[in-house]
């Protein structure tokens, strides 16, 4: 077995750090994830964020749902818990329009793991640069075609992350983004 890792469930600390830079008084973040039966990836995603939040002194509000029918009640709970932001597991990306509407209704900063959701109206995303990972996969294909055993090729992790921010959403949330932080962002959506 070999391949490339997107490390999506291992960068909770970096996600919280970026949210803290965007929202200086950040003290409560929600995470929307699916039950293990619906998406086994959700558990590690939430646990990584739970550990990172504990280290950062940020209260984490997990909202673990079965699916679309639970979104409204999950966001009501986030609002009741006074969450300032929500980090949404990528499994729910096909429902971004509904989720973005719920986040906007409750004035929650929405963090995604992909650029497309930021273009659609989320505040920010932080993830591996999947374009680079896909390009790197050609290396593996070439090695295997030339006779390498997949078990002999290491699973590689990305060396850089990609941050995308939507300035229109930031303004709608009343956030002021410092020029120093903007200089660190890879892609700025106006």
Image (spheres, rainbow, N blue to C red):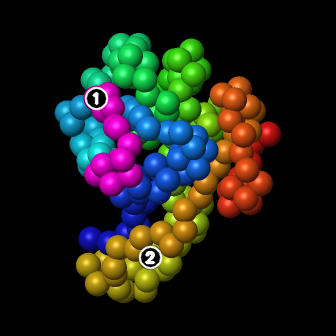
The answer to whether mark 2 and mark 1 are in CB contact below 8 A is no
Closer to the camera, 179 or 4?
179
The answer, for residue 71, to whether it is visible in the render is no
Residue 25 appears left or right of 116: left
Residue range in magenta is: 51-64
Name the residue nearer the viewer: 136 or 128: 128
x and y, in percent, of residue 85 in the image: 49, 33
| 59 inside magenta stretch | yes
Residue 76: quadrant of the picture: top left
**Where does the image place residue 97, in percent across and percent down from the top left?**
57, 23
Residue 43 is at least partly visible in this image: yes
Question: Helix, strand, or loop for circle 2?
Answer: helix
Q: Residues within 10 Å of mark 1 (few under 14, many from 20)?
A: some
Mark on residue 189? none
Disc 2 to disc 1, C-alpha distance: 36 Å
- Residue 54 placed where, x, y %? 30, 49
Provide residue 50's location: percent of width, then percent of height.
Answer: 29, 46
Label 2 Cα neighbours within 10 Å, binned few <14 / some 14-19 / many ≥20: some
Q: Is residue 119 above or below residue 137?
A: above
In the rendered view, tell whether residue 159 sits above or below residue 67: below
Q: Which residue is mark 2?
A: 140
Q: Which residue is mark 1?
A: 64
């Amino acid at each position: 077995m070999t391949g490339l890792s997107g490390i999506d469930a291992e960068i909770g600390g970096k996600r919280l750090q970026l949210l803290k830079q965007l929202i200086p008084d950040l003290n409560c973040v929600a995470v929307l994830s699916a039950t293990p039966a619906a998406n086994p990836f959700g558990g590690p995603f939430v646990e990584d964020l739970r550990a990172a939040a504990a280290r950062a002194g940020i209260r984490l509000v997990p909202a673990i749902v079965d699916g679309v029918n639970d979104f409204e009640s999950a966001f009501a709970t986030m609002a009741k818990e006074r969450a300032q932001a929500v980090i949404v597991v990528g499994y729910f990306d096909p429902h971004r329009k509904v989720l973005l509407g719920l986040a906007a209704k409750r004035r929650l900063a929405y963090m995604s793991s992909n650029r497309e959701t930021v273009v659609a109206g989320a505040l920010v995303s932080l993830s591996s640069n999947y374009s680079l990972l896909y390009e790197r996969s050609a290396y593996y294909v070439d090695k295997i075609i030339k006779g390498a055993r997949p078990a002999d090729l290491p699973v590689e992790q990305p060396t850089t992350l990609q941050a995308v921010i939507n300035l229109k959403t930031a303004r709608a949330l009343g956030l002021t983004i410092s020029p120093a932080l903007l200089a660190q962002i890879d892609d700025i959506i106006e």
